[in-house]
Every structure is written in structure tokens, then in C-alpha cells.
Amino acid sequence: MATKINLNQPKNQIVKQLNLMHAVDIANELYELNEEERIELIHILPIDMVDNVFLELEEDEIVDFFSHLDDVRRRRLLTDLSAHDLKLLFELLEKEESVRLLSFLSTDKKVVIEKLMLYDETKAASMMRDNYIVLKKDYNISNAMKEVINEVKDTDLIDTIFIVDNDELYGLIYLKDLIIARKNDSLESIINTDIKVINDEASLSDAINKISNYDIKVLPVVNSNNHLVGIITADDVLEEIALDHESHVDKFVAMGDFDEDSSPFVRAYQRLPWLLVSIVLNLVIAMFLSIFSGTIEMISALILFQPLILGMAGNIGTQAIAVTILKIHKNETKDFSQHIKKEVLIGVVNAIIVGVFGFLLSWGFLSFSSFDVGSVNLILLSFVIALSLALSMFLSAIFGVFIPIILTKLKVDPAAASGPVISTINDLVALLIYFGLATIIIIPLIS
């Protein structure tokens, strides 16, 4: 259990307590304090913990934290952290302040940060790191080990070391192999040349897929000349996947931009537009249903099975939408035809099976219940219910497949297709099928 920081104790005791805490616990507690307490804690934070606490902050806390650091702690943070870790800070700062701080960085780090900020966030290179070690191919083991010892910094990732030949990426070696190799051996004997790389212009989703599919811990990023320009780590990808997943879940339920610290009124305001749109669409449904008021009056039993029709249509539609959005997000639908065929076939099979069960269950319920269906033939009514189930489920599955694909083609976020609006459209189609079939098939026989 995380230890709470007691700011009422002497300063040396607070520092001692902070040294015993994990950076993530300090970061979490930091922004539960009021502004005065937060500033006090930042000022006494041990200088060797500043970097780690900074890395655990949420995006909306970064600038506030940095602005309250003294000059010594600022310089330490700017010096110790990699360009990758500093990139977000420079993106969040005001332009003038960002330019001023860039002038304090080493030339190499400044160039890397400016380059990272130029990449579109959808590109793989936008999240690459520069804290890695590079060795030349013609080194022997002894020279390579000396170079690693002399060049390594605390923030460098050294488990994987990259090898270049005439500035081109040649392969990689693992630190454990370098340690156990004989000192007079050539580096060539432990170089792995069969490596996966990603171009700096490739999409971020391509990098995520490559790391996931090949179980890669570190993915080198190269330019068009096969020069190593950075690396992407599995940890960074995992964090990106988690953030992206959270974003898609929020959109899936049409919640808008979600902030845990938002008041109930702010959250209500974010969700309200979708709910209002749903109200309007439900009024449209009510208007269409008024067309079938005569059918409903003559066959009141139809109302009993309306929730069944709507529920099953919504379920299969949601399943199809979720699978399609997941495929699109994982970039697995460059050729949509196979996915469409598969999902349509699934929709047909499920619709037929559920339709048959719907017929048997509705006929059994109506036969043994005391509900008066008048002169309506039970088998015919059960057939209409079953056919409505099958058709509405099939069409909902079709909508679930095609709507995200169409939105993707139009360069619109497909996650929006899974909100309340699409659910309401599914309801409208299902009810039109249900009451429409009843009007066409049953009404003429009992009129």
C-alpha cells in the first residue's frame, strides 16, 4: 500500500520519506495536494528523483510540474532525459518558452527533439527513442566492450546494441552475448543480421503490428538510406496501445473526451449531445411506428416480442461493429473483401439459427400462455416473429460491417459508428421489418 506524504514533519524527514517511495506513488499523490502543498513538495523533491517522477505524470500535469522546478532541477531533467521523453514537454510548452529551452540542450538532443516534433503522430518515427548504443562492424569484442563502457549513459537501452557498416544498419548484438564472448573474437561472430526494421515514414500501426507479431523488444527505425535514426521499444508500444484502447472505448460508448477529474456536470455535458441525437431519432422511430398503429391494435401480441427483435438485432450489430473496428485498428483489413464475406456468412448462420429458435419459443409461449391473440393463427404469427428476427439480425450484421468500412474510406473515425446513433438506426430498421411483415402477411388474412 502506498505511503502518504506527511508535509507537517521536518523537511529532512519528508526527504527521507520520499526516498523510500516509488516515483509513481509520488506522482499520484502530488496532484492530490493543493497548489501550495504541491509547490512545496516539488521544491524539496530529491534531485535524483525528479526524472522518474516526471515520467510518471499525466499529460495535463507535465507543464505545471516543470514550471515549479528550480533551475538546478530543470537542468538536471533536460540533461538526463532522452529526446523521446522530453518531446511531449516541448510540444505542450508555449512556443517562445519551448524555443528558449531548446537553446539549453546539447546540439544532438536539440536536433533529435526538433525532428521528432516534425513527424506526424500517426507515423512510427513520432515515438522513436535516441537513447541507444551503436557500434561499428569492424570492432573486435574487446574494442566493442570498451566502447560500450565509455559511451553508455544511465538512460541508454543497452540490452540490444546496434551495428552499422558505412553508416548503414547492418545488424544487432545482445549485451549478454558480448559479455560472454572471447575478447579477441571478431564482432561479426555474434552479430544477428536477420532483423526486422521499420521505415521512418511507415505508420505507427505498422510498427505496433510488427512488434506484436514478431515479439520484438526493440524495433530499429531507418530512413530511406537504411541509416538508423531511432528505435521503438515494446514498452512504448504497450503504452500507446493502452491509451488508444481507452480512447476507442470512450468513443465506442460515445462518451467524448473523458477526464477522471471532470465534475459530474462536465461529464454530463460531454455525453448530452449524443443522448439528444438519440432522442430525436427515437422520435423518428415513433413517427414511423404510428404508420403501423392499426396493425398494433389488431395484433397486440406483437408488442410482447418487440424487445426480443430489438435486443437480438442490437447484439449482432454490436458484435460485427466491434470486430470490424478492431480489424481496422490493427490494420488487418487492407483487403476488406475477405472480412466482409466472413462476417456476412456469420450473420446469415446466426440469423437462421436464432430465427428457428425464435419461431419455436414464440409458438410455445403463445400456445401455453393466457394471452389472447384473437383470430390470429399462432403458427403464422410465430413465423412473422422468426422471419423478423432473422432479417433484422442479418441487416444489423451488414450495417455493423459496412458502416465502419465506409467511414474509414471517408477518413472518418470508425469508432463513432458504434455510438447510440447507430444503435437507434438498428432499432428503426428492426421495427420497420417486424411491423411491416406483420402488416403485409397477417393483416390481409384477418381483415
Image (cartoon, helix red, strand yellow):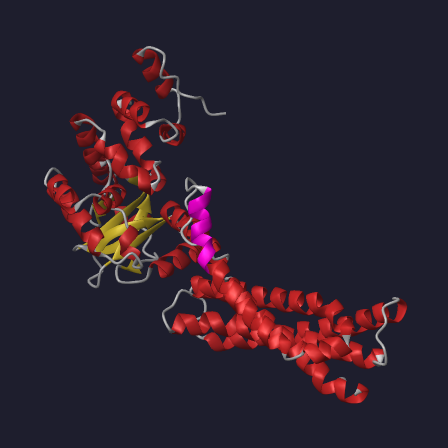
Residues rendered magenta in the picture: 264-273
Residue at image location 27% in from the left, 25% down from the top = 39
Is 272 part of what is drawn in magenta? Answer: yes
Image coordinates of residue 25 in percent, x first then y, are 41, 28
Image coordinates of residue 130 in percent, x first then y, are 24, 46
Residue 273 lies left or right of residue 91; in this view the side is right
* Residue situated in front as seen by the camera: 102 or 137: 102
Is 400 part of what is drawn in magenta? Answer: no
Residue at image location 43% in from the left, 21% down from the top = 4
Residue 3 seen in the figure: yes
* Residue situated in front as seen by the camera: 29 or 338: 29
Residue at image location 29% in from the left, 56% down from the top = 121
Residue 401 lies left or right of residue 123; in this view the side is right
Quadrant where the image shows the C terminus: bottom right
* Residue situated in front as seen by the camera: 326 or 207: 326
* Residue situated in front as seen by the camera: 414 or 372: 372
Image coordinates of residue 207 in percent, x first then y, are 36, 57
Q: Most prominent secondary structure in the magenta stretch?
A: helix
